[in-house]
Image (tube, rainbow, N blue to C red):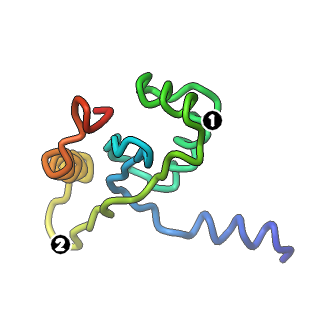
Amino acid sequence: MDRKKELKQLYKESEIEAGVYQIKNKQTGKVFVASTPNLKTLNGKKFMLKNGTFINKELQADWNRAGEDAFEITVLEVLKKKKDGYFNEKIELEKLEEKWLEQLQPFGDKGYN
């Protein structure tokens, strides 16, 4: 199997992880906190910022003004999935995001939420 096919197969087989992430402005300390059902999409968030199409207009304006190097994107927590019993990923992901919103309080002068 050639390398490209092998990498594509590895990507398809890798587990999809849900979680909470932050985009932090290193100059101001302001943060944007959000969750995603697929942490692999963080590259897509960065792509949106680079292309001026991010959903949060205040964050987008700061990105445009300060540039990519002024920001860092980090995973705050990966959602741990239960093996037994009923598990609603969407509800659990919302709870996890709420936990981080309460902890970091990224509102007003402290954030973009």
Residue 40, compared with residue 12, is above or below; it is: above
Nearer-the-camera pick, 41 or 29: 29
Name the residue rendered at 71%, 64% in the picture: 8
Q: Identify the mark at residue 50; answer none if there is no mark.
A: 1
Residue 68, compared with residue 14, is above or below; it is: above
Judged from the image, the secondary structure of the residue bearing numbered disc 2 is loop
Percent from the top left, x then y, of residue 59? 43, 31
Direction from residue 33 to residue 51 in the image, left or right = right
Name the residue rendered at 15%, 52% in the picture: 103
Q: Which residue is mark 2?
A: 84
How many numbered circles are shown?
2
Please name the amino acid that badge 2 sits on.
Asp
Please name the amino acid that badge 1 sits on.
Lys
Mark 1 vs mark 2: which is more N-terminal? Answer: 1
Name the residue rendered at 28%, 33% in the picture: 113
Percent from the top left, x then y, of residue 30? 34, 41
Instruction: State the residue lying farthest toward the right.
Output: 2
